[in-house]
Image: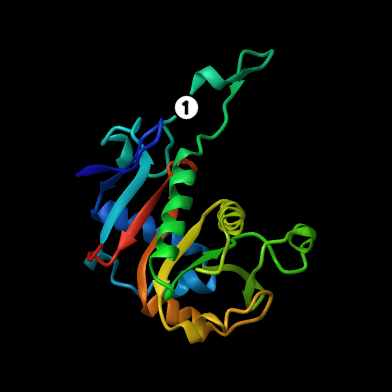
Amino acid sequence: MARALMPKSKMIKKTELTSEAAVKYLRDQFYFSKPLSDLLGNIALEKGKIYALADDIFSNEALQNFEIGSAVDLSKAVYLEDGSYLTPIPDDARKAFIILIKDYLESSPLNCCIIEDPLREPDDPIVLKSKIRYVTVEDQLYYFLDGGSDPEEIENSVHAGEAYYSLCMLSSFDLGLHKEFAPFSSVSERLLEEIVNNLDSFFVGAYDHEGYLMWTSGTH
């Protein structure tokens, strides 16, 4: 099953891919063993549904190869003297993903989003110079977003959270707990457990940074 996630010049489609292979790919992302990933490892992924969010240039067969990108636009290639070329990574799926997060946060004041940063630590120069607000759990950076986050902060947080892997979660819980995610504070793992216990969906990067896999509990 496939449907358009939103109207765009390049259509981003949401395609159900629930399978043992998709579950395995998701679990493989937890190998990197950040605190939030560890908690996700306790979820019975087999009981949910898994979707691909990717450009409609991907065939259904290509969507089964979660590690491989396909949406290369040679019209934008930069050719080098040795005959090789460089192409920009298509970001249409990321733009659609950012809009999806914005829509989710706007749909209820209880809704929130947390993005795990796989690379940076609080004392990294790039973090110190950045205006992105974060919280930490044992020096692990997370970007917490809710209805009070502006569009620029959402976009910057998504970009900052993408590296050799990416993990983003959408959850909904009491507003009083939102306040415990105060910017630049250290939070307990208990709050991460609250996010996982009230999870609506989570996303990991796929298709060589050209798309995402989305897991839901099956009610969305």
Position of 136 with respect to 198 (left or right) is right
Position of 201 with respect to 193 (left or right) is left
Q: Which residue bears the numbered disc 1?
A: 72
Q: Quadrant of the C terminus?
A: bottom left
The spot of residue 206 in percent (x, y) is: 43, 47
Occupied quadrant, residue 131: bottom right
Mark 1 nearby-residue class (10 Å; few <14, some 14–19, many ≥20): some
Secondary structure, mark 1, is loop
Occupied quadrant, residue 127: bottom right
Q: Nearer the viewer, residue 102 or 53?
A: 102
The scheme the figure's colours follow is: rainbow
Q: Residue at x 74, y 59 (%)?
A: 130
Position of 195 with respect to 149 (left or right) is left
Occupied quadrant, residue 27: bottom left
Q: Nearer the viewer, residue 168 or 5?
A: 5
The spot of residue 104 in percent (x, y) is: 40, 62
The spot of residue 196 in percent (x, y) is: 40, 76
Q: Residue at x 59, y 51 (%)?
A: 159
Residue type at the position of mark 1: Val
Q: Nearer the viewer, residue 188 or 41?
A: 188
